[in-house]
Image (cartoon, helix red, strand yellow):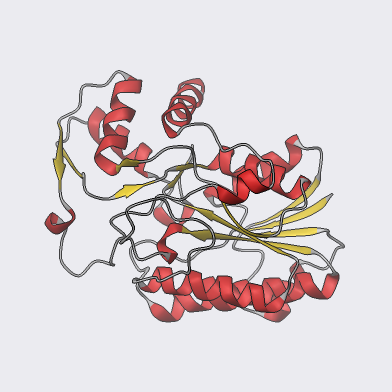
Amino acid sequence: MRVVVVGATGQFGRAMVAACREASWQVLPLGHEAVEVADRASVAGALEAPYDVVVNATVWHGPAQEDPVMALRVNALGARVVADHAASRGATCVTVSTDYVFDGDATCPYDETVTPAPRSVYGISKATGEALVRASTADHLIVRVASLFDIGGSRAKGGTSFVATMLANARAGKPLRVVNDQVHSPSYAPDAAATTVALLRRGARGIAHVTNAGWCSWFEMAAAVFEEAGIGADLAPSSLKDLPAGGPPRPRYSVLAHGALRRHGVPSPRPWREAIRDYLTREAQR
């Protein structure tokens, strides 16, 4: 299998490159500096060599995620341009998406069949990107992740992640107030990437949720990080209403069901707490 990973310097991209190599696939990593996904000439030049699969792991998010121009350019138009190129080559297009495509009003896990209803610019741009990919090619796999974390963190967020931030602040003795009324399914990047490889081996197409098994609030996740790390932190719960005004809307409940994984005979990634344990083991070995 010949795979191109666009956005190879991000959390998912790095993990996907490693997972492809573990599968003994040929992989070409392309960082953000190597290709402008919304520019057809740039994509055509960077993806000149033959390939069987292109994984588009680029994303516009972070402090400026409510900038509609950049969000739509990268997350929507960029997704379509990459999908168009894959279609022209007869290749499979894998697009990485997010739980923010949902409104967060559910009380049970969102299945892949639920119609997106995003409320933030980020969510709208990613849902639009999904629709444009589906319109471009039937040979697509849309992988939804949530609350992604890994060693090295997110390039777009300065090389950090929630887990890394919690550990750094606790070790510095800072008080931590973390929301306890936003429930989600964390995604450990190495597990999400390995599951994506398994889906590709099965010939899966359409939409698949690849979060780790189980769910938690951000407060519960932070508490688990400190317990597994053996750190006594000054941690207390807070509420979404306590966050500064003017920030992007956050889904209160965005747990993702794994119906597509079951249909394709692919196991769900391990429970999120076990993933945190693996993260801490790897961190200690660095």
Whole-percent x and y of residue 227? 29, 22
Which residue shows up at 28% across the image and 66% down it? 249
Which residue shows up at 48% across the image and 64% down it? 114
Q: Nearer the viewer, residue 1 or 154?
A: 1
User: Can residue 10 be seen in this snapshot?
Assistant: yes
Does residue 14 sit above or below 267 in this rendering?
Answer: below
Q: What count of labels does the image hold?
A: 0
User: Can residue 61 be seen in this snapshot?
Assistant: no
Left or right: 206 as drawn, with respect to 232: right
Does residue 226 sit above or below 215 in this rendering?
Answer: above
Left or right: 268 as drawn, with respect to 273: right
Which residue shows up at 62% across the image and 44% down it? 262
Whole-percent x and y of residue 201? 77, 45
Whole-percent x and y of residue 117? 40, 71
Q: Nearer the viewer, residue 12 or 204?
A: 204
Q: Residue furthest right?
A: 50
Whole-percent x and y of residue 173? 18, 30
